[in-house]
Amino acid sequence: MKKVVFPGSIAGVILFVISYGGLYLGVRLFPYLFVEYNNPLFNSDGSRDMLFYSHAFLISMALSWFWERFKTLFHGSFITRGVEFGLVYSLVALLPVMWITFSALDITVVMVAGWFVYGLVQAVIAGLVFARINP
C-alpha cells in the first residue's frame, strides 16, 4: 500500500500545482480557447467544487496503482518508462473516454483535443514521478 499511496501523493501535489498553474497561464495566454466554457453545460452551483479540485489526487492515486501493477512491462530509462506509461494510459483509457464524451455532449473537437492533451501530459508527468520514486 505504501508503494501506491506515497508516490500517488507526490504525483498528486505535482499535478495539482502544474494543472492549476497551467490553467491560469492558459486563460491568460489563450483566452479564445476558454470562451467555449461560458456555456450552461459547464456552470456549477459550487456544491461540487471540491470534486473538481481533488481531481489531481484522484487521478494520481489511480495511476499509481496502475503503475504498481504493470511497471514491469515498461523498460528503459525512467524518462522512457514514464512517457510510455503516459501513452499507454492515454490510448487505453483516455481516448475512449474522450470519444464518448465528444459523441454525447455538444462540445467542439478543439475542447476534446485539449482535454486529451491535458490528460496525456498528466499521465506522462505521473509516470515520470512513479518511474523515479518507485522503479
Image (spheres, grey):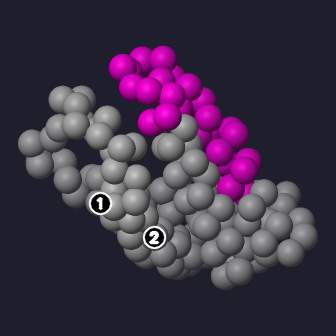
Where residue 3 appears, as percent x and y from the top left, is 61, 75
- Residue topped by disc 1: 53
How crowded pointer 2 is (Cα within 10 Å; few <14, some 14-19, many 20+) is rated as some
Q: Is residue 110 magenta?
A: yes
Give the left or right position of residue 103, taking residue 67 as reference: left
Q: To which quarter of the image does residue 66 belong? A: bottom right
Residue type, numbered disc 2: Ile
Whether residue 89 is situated above or below residue 113 in the rendered picture:
below
Residue at 61%, 67% in the rendered image: 125
Q: Is tag 2's residue or tag 1's residue first in the polypeptide sequence?
A: 2
Magenta residues, start to end: 85-111
Q: CA distance from mark 2 to mark 1?
A: 13 Å
Q: Which mark is residue 26?
A: none
Residue type, numbered disc 1: Tyr
Q: Nearer the viewer, residue 85 or 21?
A: 21
Where residue 65 appears, as percent x and y from the top left, is 60, 60
Q: To which quarter of the image does residue 36 belong? A: top left
- Residue topped by disc 2: 18
Whether residue 98 is situated above or below residue 25 in the rendered picture:
above
Residue at 83%, 67% in the rendered image: 80
Query: Most prominent secondary structure in the magenta stretch?
Result: helix
Residue at 51%, 28% in the rendered image: 109
Quadrant occupied by the C terminus: bottom right
Residue 116 showing in the rendered view? yes
